[in-house]
Image (tube, helix red, strand yellow):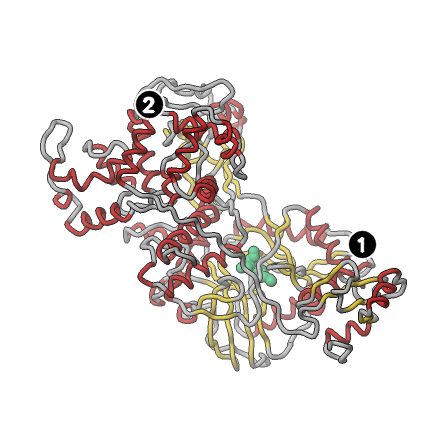
Amino acid sequence: MSGQSPQLILQQLADELARHDALYHLHDEPEIDDAQYDSLRQAYLELAKQYPDAVPSQGPHTRVGAAPSEGFQKITHAFPMLSLENVFSAEELRDWVEGIRHFLMELRDPCVAIHFCCEPKIDGLSCSLRYERGVLISAATRGNGVEGEDVTHNARTIPAIPQQLIGSGWPEILEVRGEVFMSDADFLQLNEDQDRAGARRFANPRNAAAGSLRQLDASITQQRPLRFFAYALGEISETFAQTQSEIRAKLAEWGFTLNEPAQVCMEQDGVLDTLKGYYAMLGARRADLGFSIDGLVIKVDRLDWQARLGFVSRAPRWAVAWKFPPEQAMTQIEDIRCQVGRTGRITPVAHLKPISVGGVLVARATLHNADEIARKDIRVGDSVIIQRAGDVIPQVVSVQLSQRLEGSIAYNFPELCPACASALRREEGDADTYCPGGLSCPAQVQERLSYFVSRQAMDIEGLGEKNIALFIEKGLLNSPGDIFTLEEREADWKDAEGKSLPLLKYWDGWGAQSATKLYEAIRRAREPTFDRFLVALGIRQVGEATARLLGRHFLNIQSLLDCLDRALDGDEPSRAELLAIDGIGESMLKDLLDFRAEPHNRQTLSALLNAATPSTEPLLKVQEFQSPMTQSPIAGKTVVFTGTLERLSRSEAKAQAENLGAKVAGSVSSKTDFLVAGPGAGSKATKAAELGVHVLSEQEWIDLILGNSDSGTS
Ligand code: IVH
């Protein structure tokens, strides 16, 4: 952690997590997979535990949907909790089935039927329950798949989770996995209650379930209407079933609720009809289930096949999620209004007759730009189909022309800015329309300042949209630099007429404490990281990812500015230096240079650099998550397969070897430990003989990995 303060590293991690949270929860466009996200989070939590004083006040623990996890104990899962690969069409499903048939030798015969247990895919969060002698011992969230958070106290408050199994025949150790979720009706009710209590609404049932389960105070969880469906096993001390459907039957007997409707479907000779039928049936019933599902889960029913199929990275080969397309609904456009963004870009927004789409009340949809409205001929009063994919801002898919109101007129894009009445501009070849008002446009000032203080930028707590609007209205804030001089100017604050204003603590709704807190937050923001600072400047196209690229390259802001200045003076090597950064192209460079060339920006920037000192510390690179290989007779060995294997497909043999910690190579060398040779082995066997490499038959290999012999592990 060479030279960087824990505070800085924690802040960077929190920042990074916040960005991924937003990508996942708000935009549904994750850049990293769950495992990578979890390892990032893990890194944060471990450091936070070590340096509790350095934990940022707006860390991942303060966000809805993310846990106050520092408070939770860890539980290591006896078996890792996996995620699922997705398919989106019958064709992709066919490919997946083909893969299974290829992997298991005996399934290469298309006449052999494969039975699949199909279940709805619930949108909640997974949880692993451990029972010993029929008694609930612990409950853990998925966490990073290997280690989760101990939510035992919380799980005990969920009625659908048995504290004691009923019936008989359960194994001494039984881990049951399933999904904690909230029904749509309960979710709507909870949000109403949140409104009444002045608390924050939850974005969707999944967030509500996650936020409710991961509470440090179990009495809060108890008040939340959580449910649980069981769908898989973790560790078990004895087997009690041969198929997934038998597991389900037993779990139901022992007191668990199952996700219904489930169905055993099959595939034979490439015919997927029963699977497609189930997909269609579930899709048709989706809206009436009472809880959100985002597709179905298809699991190879036979457990022995499941075991042999195993998993690739974090997902099983024996199960897949077949996702539904985004949910749609029909509603009416009541109005179209234009919003002015931070850069002056005008976004037309449809104000809709509110409608519930997949459990979420939707009242607005983006219309993108003038061309989009013209292309779809979207008009006020039109009935439209809107869709929501995950949590993304809803979009208008199409207009129901047959229902168009008589006398409706095409939408006229405004010519003047709705906020400052400047004449709007649209350049040739640009789809977007802009307000040229800059800082004289109140909407842009508001947006720009809100962006400047937002979490991904300077992260100044206490300066939310409402307060910024208030300070702007009183004439106290105009540009970002003003934020840092607010406190020192306080005694001289004057309103527009030149009348003295009272100190902040005497304002309506403020007090000594909130004023002090705000000033403290502003003071803390005087030492931002390089990338936050750069993001906060709001240069077009320079978001967090680009800021980080520039941060890694230049290490401090002054070197970047110097380089831009030289490039502006026509210095080719400086231009080349910028373009050589992977991820920076001509158009981004143009935006950087345009920003730097603007005199007003120079002014703002130097005011800012007087007030704040961006750090010069290199940004943290996060290590990837790696699960160490276990001990096994072949751990660390290099294996080569050759000839025809009869009992194992090449893929199964390779996967098995890798799972046991061996490396599988394509050719024999002095580094090879074993050559597994089936009939027809050629030059590789000859070479192995020359080099004295241990040669095994397929059977000897199977015995070796099963531990049935001592075939030369020495
Ligand atoms: S089986 C190894 N069955 O979906 C098998 N998972 O996207 C993993 N999920 O992490 C779980 N419904 O949280 C299974 N019927 C179902 C499910 C289900 C929802 C969740 C689960 C999993 C995630 C993967």
Q: Residues within 10 Å of mark 1 (few under 14, many from 20)?
A: few
Q: Nearer the viewer, residue 525 or 5?
A: 5
Left or right side of 124 for 696: right
Q: Which residue is mark 2?
A: 437
Q: Quadrant of residue 561?
A: top left
Left or right side of 206 for 220: left
Q: Nearer the viewer, residue 371 or 505?
A: 505
Q: Is residue 337 visible?
A: no
Please state the quadrant of the image where ligand 1 appears.
Answer: bottom right
Q: Quadrant of residue 353?
A: top left
Q: Is residue 600 visible?
A: yes
Q: Which residue is mark 1?
A: 269
Question: Which residue sits at x=67%, y=68%?
Answer: 636
The amino acid sitting under disc 1 is Asp
* Nearest to viewer (mark 2 / mark 1): 2
Q: Nearer the viewer, residue 565 or 25?
A: 565
Residue 470, given in percent of the width and then of the height, sits at 22, 37
Mark 2 and mark 1: span between their CA atoms?
66 Å
Residue 323, given in percent of the width and then of the height, sits at 60, 49
Residue 572, given in percent of the width and then of the height, sits at 50, 27
